[in-house]
Amino acid sequence: MSALAAAVEPARSAAAAVVPARIALLGTGTVGSAVLTRLSAWSGLPLGKRLSLVHVANSRQAASDRSGLAPDEAGQRLMLAPQSSSLDAIEAALRGVGPRIVIDATASEAVAERHAHWLAQGIHVVTACKIGQGTSLSRWRSIRVAAAAGDTGYGDSATVGAGLPLLRSLRELQAGGDRIHAIAGVLSGSLAWLFNHYDGMRPFSALVRQARDAGYTEPDPRDDLSGEDVRRKLLILARAAGVELEAADVDVTSLVPAELAILSRDGVDAALPALDAPLRERYAAAYKRGERLRFIARLQDGRARVGLESLPADHPLAGGAGTDNRVAIWSDRYREQPLLIQGPGAGAEVTAAGLLDDVLRIAGRR
Ligand SMILES: NC(=O)C1=CN([C@@H]2O[C@H](COP(=O)(O)OP(=O)(O)OC[C@H]3O[C@@H](n4cnc5c(N)ncnc54)[C@H](O)[C@@H]3O)[C@@H](O)[C@H]2O)C=CC1
Ligand SMILES: N[C@@H](CC=O)C(=O)O
């Protein structure tokens, strides 16, 4: 063997020895389908060889295959699957050699409630759903305790900013010795899109339907319009910044009128026009002053609030386009001028990419 071949051989056999991570994907809606599309584009490529999809489920059905499901056939397998969906089936489905990872692409309380259990059992969790870390402080703590006990990773990049480097930046600043002083910005991709497009002419409700059909809103758009989704994101950011707030500590001003808030989910679409008159008034008042409406989250001095603000057109948080999130972070090193992070904050493809970045990072932990 030549000297070069001898040097290359160990690296080659190390690569060959990499055991793929076994993946269970929960949720095949807007985000879950985009995860399958991205995985299927990796079939046969080095990235794809690092992952083996062994379980796929939505709220009704599930399909499992220990030898791996082809991502582009997973949807079909699910439709034909006789297996009904059960969270109790996940551990058995993931059994085998190599890292085990659950991807949560649902908006399900029941799935979020299992995160800590899986982590403690040695199963890593990667999630787009904010219910795990963005609701009660006790659940947030139990996730951290379980991850430490199980020596497992919790991938949460997609929970805030749909994968933008927000949580990562907060953690890196603190790892470098900085304290986080304040955070302010637009944390909702759908509300950013709505207020970037609303001109007081078309009914606001028509734009809400458009945002929902584009996959930017939560499964129930009232979760965005009420500020609840932003509350969860601000809680996740605050807790990551060392400010351990309870959900009730965030002061949220909802855009949802009472008559829309009380409806069951089936009645929401028909009642969306209840949004139109109040928002037309808010828009007209802002327009007269030459200002822009933006749905802003703020954290400063342990106080947190979320709501619609009218900002001067040249205000740093008034910029951006489409679904852009735009977030300012003040810390020891960014004392006067904040660090600004901007980019698409909703949408299936960016979110799926954020999820799979976390999956690859965790699969690479040895
Ligand atoms: N749409 C977006 O731009 C972004 C969404 N997210 C989050 O991603 C999650 C999913 O959002 P979408 O895909 O838009 O929702 P969706 O409503 O399109 O899909 C949800 C999926 O979860 C499934 N599901 C519900 N309960 C389940 C269970 N117990 N077991 C297995 N599957 C279950 C449903 O059947 C459905 O397939 C949400 O938590 C959302 O907040 C995060 C960042 C961006
Ligand atoms: N509905 C959310 C989706 C991403 O988290 C949003 O509008 O930002």
Image (cartoon, rainbow, N blue to C red):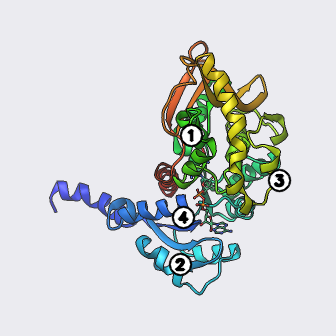
> Can residue 238 be seen in the rendering of this structure?
no
Q: Position of residue 125 (x, y in %)?
A: 62, 58
User: Mark 2 sits on what residue?
Assistant: 78
Per the model, the C-alpha gap separating discs 2 and 1 is: 40 Å
Q: As shown in the figure, which amino acid type bears the numbered disc 2?
A: Leu
Of the two numbered discs 3 and 2 on the same chain, state the one appearing first in sequence. 2
Per the model, the C-alpha gap separating discs 1 and 4 is: 50 Å
Asked whether, in this view, residue 213 is left or right of residue 252, the answer is left
Q: Are marks 4 and 2 in contact (CB under 8 Å)?
A: no
Of the two numbered discs 1 and 4 on the same chain, state the one appearing first in sequence. 4
Q: Position of residue 146 (x, y in %)?
A: 73, 55
Q: Position of residue 35 (x, y in %)?
A: 48, 60
Q: As shown in the figure, which amino acid type bears the numbered disc 4?
A: Pro
Per the model, the C-alpha gap separating discs 3 and 4 is: 44 Å
User: Mark 3 sits on what residue?
Assistant: 262
Q: Quadrant of residue 93?
A: bottom right
User: Mark 1 sits on what residue?
Assistant: 202
Q: Residue at x 54, y 41 (%)?
A: 345
Asked whether, in this view, residue 285 is left or right of residue 4, the answer is right
Q: Secondary structure at mark 2?
A: helix
Q: Is mark 2 within 8 Å of ligand 1?
A: no
User: Mark 4 sits on what residue?
Assistant: 99
Q: Is mark 3 within 8 Å of ligand 2?
A: no
Numbered disc in front, either 1 or 4: 1
